[in-house]
C-alpha cells in the first residue's frame, strides 16, 4: 500500500516465535498484518497457536511462554522494545479483547458497571460521568434492555449471551484501534452465536476498528473477514483475502479444512475430516523446519 | 434483533438463617457480658469466702440464693468468674485473630499472585513453620517472652499465620488464572491494583470464614495456656484456669469445671459456624 508510510498498519506481527522453556516452539515465524478497519481471521484447529498470537499482542501470555524471536508493532510502535509498564499502557490505550469465555472474563465479585468503566477512567483519563454515559450508550447499542440495572448487576445475574454482549460493549467502549476477538462465540449456544457474530460485525463497521478474529470455524470466516490466515501447528499455511480462500484455496491444508466444514445446504455430503496423511506430511515438514531452525540458532 | 432483559434479581425469601443467627445470638450474649462484666456479674470474681466454698448451682439442693452456678473451692462465684473470663477470652480472640489474619492473608495473597520467588520463599517458610509442634512452640514462646496477654496474642499470631497463608495462597492462585485478571491487565491495571481490586474481593469470603475459625482457635489456645498457667496470673478469672481448677474437684464439685467448659465449647463452635454462615452470606456466587 502506498499510504503505509504515513498511516502505519494497525498491527504488524513479524516473524513471531513463541517457545516453551524447554525450547519447543509453539509459534513458528508467524507474520501477519492488519490495516486500519480490517478484519483478519486466524483459523486453524485447536492447538494451532491461534489464540497465542492474540495473547502475545495483548501481553497476556502465560508466564512459562516466551517470545523468543520476532517483532510486534501496534500502530507502528515496537511493543517488544518497551518496558513492561509502557507496553501495558500502550496496549490499554489502543487495543481491547473480546474473550472466549464470558463466564470467567467478568469478575464475579464486582458489579458490571465499574468493570466497564475502570479502564476508561484509569487509562483514558475520562471522568466517571463520561465513562458511565459511554458505557450506558454502548450497553444499549448491544441490545441490552435496561442498561442502568445491568450496570448495577453482578455477572451471575446475567445469562451467557448477555455477558458476552457486556464484554463486547466493554471492548468497544474506549474506541480501540484493534480488537482481538478470541473465539468469542465458542462458549455460547448456537442461536446466540449468530447474534453475537452479527453484533461484532456491525460495531466493527460502525467504528472502523481493526479486528483480529480467532476461530476454528470456517463458517465464521466467510461471515466476518476480509483476510484469512490459516495456521497449522503454529505455522502459517496460507494468508489470503477471504474470497480467494474459498474460491481458490492454494494450500492443501486450507482445502482440507474447507472440505471438513459441514454445510447445512448439503446435509447428505459425508463428513470428511482433514486426512491423516496430510497431517503427517505437514508435521514432517515442521520437524524438518525446527531442525533447520535450531541449526541456524546455534 | 430481540432486546434482552436482565433476569429479575433473585429475591430470596428472607428465611431465618440459623447458621448465622444462633452463633450471633450466643456470641452477642458473651460480648455483652464481657463489655459490661462489672455491671452484670452478681459478685466480685476475686472475692473468696471460705464459708461458701463449693456451693452447688441454684437448681440443686444445698445451694445459696444469688450463687446461680455455684462456687469454687475458695468460695468464688462461678458465674461471675465466667463473665469476667469472657472479657479475656474475647479480647484475646479478636486481637490475636485479626493480627494473624492480616499477616497470613497478606503473605498468602502475595505468594499466590506474584508466584516465582515470592511463592517459593513464602511456601518454604510455611513448610518449615508447620514442622514445629504448635503447642510446644506456644509454650516455648510464652516461656521466652514471659507470661501475660501480649505473649499469648503474639504466640497465636506467630503460630497460626500459616493457616491463612496456605489457604489464601491456594485460593489466590485459582483466581489469578481466571480470565478477568487478564481483562484487567489489558485494561491497564497495575499488578498490585489487580491483586487488591480484582482478586481480593473474590478471596474475601474465605478470609472471613478463616478469621472466624481463628477467633475460635484463639479462645482455645488462650484457655490451654491458662490451663497450664502460662497466660495471666492464676487469680485472674479465665475459662482455662477455671477448668484447670475445677479438674481437682470434679468428683464432688463438677460445676466448677463444666460451666466454663460449656461456655468455651459454645463460643468456639459459634465462631466456626458463623464463619461458614458469613461466607455463604457474602459470596455473590454462592447466593
Image (cartoon, coloured by chain):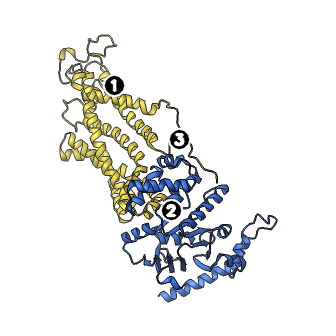
Chain colours: A blue, B yellow
Q: Which residue in the protein does label 3 denote?
A: B9
Judged left or right of residue A188, residue B179 is left
User: Which image quarter is the N terminus of chain A in?
Assistant: bottom right
Quarter of the image for residue B114 reads bottom left
Q: Is residue B171 above or below residue A124?
A: above
Label at residue B15: none
Q: Which residue in the protein does label 1 denote?
A: B258
Closest to the observer: B192 or B45? B192
Question: Going 46% across and 76% down the picture, which residue do you hit?
Answer: A75
Determine whether label 3 and label 2 are within 8 Å by CB: no
Residue B139 can be seen in this image: no
Q: 10 Å neighbourhood of mark 1: few (<14), some, or many (≥20)?
A: some
Q: 10 Å neighbourhood of mark 2: few (<14), some, or many (≥20)?
A: many
Helix, strand or loop status at disc 2: helix
Helix, strand or loop status at disc 3: loop
Camera-nearest label, 3 or 1: 3
Instruction: Give the spatial CA distance, label 3 vs label 1.
Output: 49 Å
* Labels 3, 1: one chain: yes
Residue B159 can be seen in this image: yes
Quarter of the image for residue A124 reads bottom left
Instruction: Give the spatial CA distance, label 3 vs label 2.
Output: 27 Å
Give the mark nearer the N terminus: 3 vs 1: 3
Where is residue B152 drawn, in percent x and y? 24, 42
Where is residue B269 drawn, in percent x and y? 39, 34
Q: Which residue in the protein does label 2 denote?
A: A172
Amino acid at each position: 500500500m502506498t499510504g503505509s508510510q504515513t498511516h502505519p498498519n494497525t498491527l504488524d506481527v513479524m516473524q513471531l516465535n513463541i517457545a516453551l522453556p524447554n525450547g519447543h516452539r509453539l509459534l513458528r515465524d508467524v507474520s501477519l498484518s492488519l490495516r486500519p478497519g480490517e478484519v483478519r481471521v486466524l483459523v486453524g484447529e485447536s492447538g494451532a497457536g491461534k489464540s497465542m498470537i492474540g495473547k502475545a499482542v495483548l501481553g497476556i501470555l502465560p508466564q512459562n511462554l516466551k517470545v523468543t524471536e520476532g517483532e510486534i508493532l501496534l500502530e507502528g510502535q515496537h511493543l517488544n522494545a518497551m518496558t513492561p509498564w509502557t507496553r501495558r499502557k500502550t496496549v490499554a490505550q489502543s487495543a481491547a479483547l473480546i474473550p472466549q469465555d464470558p463466564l470467567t472474563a467478568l469478575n464475579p465479585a464486582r458489579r458490571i458497571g465499574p468493570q466497564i468503566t475502570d479502564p476508561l477512567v484509569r487509562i483514558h483519563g475520562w471522568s466517571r460521568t463520561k465513562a458511565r454515559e459511554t458505557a450506558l450508550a454502548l450497553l444499549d447499542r448491544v441490545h441490552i434492555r435496561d442498561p442502568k440495572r445491568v450496570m448495577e448487576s453482578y455477572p451471575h445475574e446475567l445469562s451467557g449471551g448477555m455477558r458476552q454482549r457486556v464484554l463486547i460493549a466493554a471492548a468497544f467502549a474506549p474506541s480501540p484501534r484493534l480488537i482481538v476477538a478470541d473465539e468469542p462465540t465458542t462458549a455460547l449456544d448456537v442461536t446466540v452465536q449468530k447474534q453475537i457474530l452479527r453484533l461484532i460485525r456491525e460495531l466493527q463497521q460502525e467504528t472502523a476498528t481493526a479486528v483480529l478474529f480467532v476461530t476454528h470455524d470456517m463458517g465464521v470466516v466467510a461471515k466476518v473477514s476480509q483476510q484469512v490466515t490459516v495456521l497449522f501447528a503454529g505455522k502459517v499455511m496460507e494468508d489470503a483475502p477471504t474470497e480467494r480462500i474459498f474460491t481458490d484455496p492454494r494450500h492443501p491444508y486450507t482445502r482440507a479444512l474447507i472440505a471438513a466444514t459441514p454445510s447445512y445446504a448439503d446435509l447428505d455430503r459425508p463428513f470428511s475430516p482433514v486426512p491423516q496423511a496430510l497431517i503427517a506430511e505437514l508435521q514432517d515438514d515442521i520437524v524438518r523446519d525446527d531442525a533447520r531452525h535450531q541449526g541456524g540458532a546455534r | 434483533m430481540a432486546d434482552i432483559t436482565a433476569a429479575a434479581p433473585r429475591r430470596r425469601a428472607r428465611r431465618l438463617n440459623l447458621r448465622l443467627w444462633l452463633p450471633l445470638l450466643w456470641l452477642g450474649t458473651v460480648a455483652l457480658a464481657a463489655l459490661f462484666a462489672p455491671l452484670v456479674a452478681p459478685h466480685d470474681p476475686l472475692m473468696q469466702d471460705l464459708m461458701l466454698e463449693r456451693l452447688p448451682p441454684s437448681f440443686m439442693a444445698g445451694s445459696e440464693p444469688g450463687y446461680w452456678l455455684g462456687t469454687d473451692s475458695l468460695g468464688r462465684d462461678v458465674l461471675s468468674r465466667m463473665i469476667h473470663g469472657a472479657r479475656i477470652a474475647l479480647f484475646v480472640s479478636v486481637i490475636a485473630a485479626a493480627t494473624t489474619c492480616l499477616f497470613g492473608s497478606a503473605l498468602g495473597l502475595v505468594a499466590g499472585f506474584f508466584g516465582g520467588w515470592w511463592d517459593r520463599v513464602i511456601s518454604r517458610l510455611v513448610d518449615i513453620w508447620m514442622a514445629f509442634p504448635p503447642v510446644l512452640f506456644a509454650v516455648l514462646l510464652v516461656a521466652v517472652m514471659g507470661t501475660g496477654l501480649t505473649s499469648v496474642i503474639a504466640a497465636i499470631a506467630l503460630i497460626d499465620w500459616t493457616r491463612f497463608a496456605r489457604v489464601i495462597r491456594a485460593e489466590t492462585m485459582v483466581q489469578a488464572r481466571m480470565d478477568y485478571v487478564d481483562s484487567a491487565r489489558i485494561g491497564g491495571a497495575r499488578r498490585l491494583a489487580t491483586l487488591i481490586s480484582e482478586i481480593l474481593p473474590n478471596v474475601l469470603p474465605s478470609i472471613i470464614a478463616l478469621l472466624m475459625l481463628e477467633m475460635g482457635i484463639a479462645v482455645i489456645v488462650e484457655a490451654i495456656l491458662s490451663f497450664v498457667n502460662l497466660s495471666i496470673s492464676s487469680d485472674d478469672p479465665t475459662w482455662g484456669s477455671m477448668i484447670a481448677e475445677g479438674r481437682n474437684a470434679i468428683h464432688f464439685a463438677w460445676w466448677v469445671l463444666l460451666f466454663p467448659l460449656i461456655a468455651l465449647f459454645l463460643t468456639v463452635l459459634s465462631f466456626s459456624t458463623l464463619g461458614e454462615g458469613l461466607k455463604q452470606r457474602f459470596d455473590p456466587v454462592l447466593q
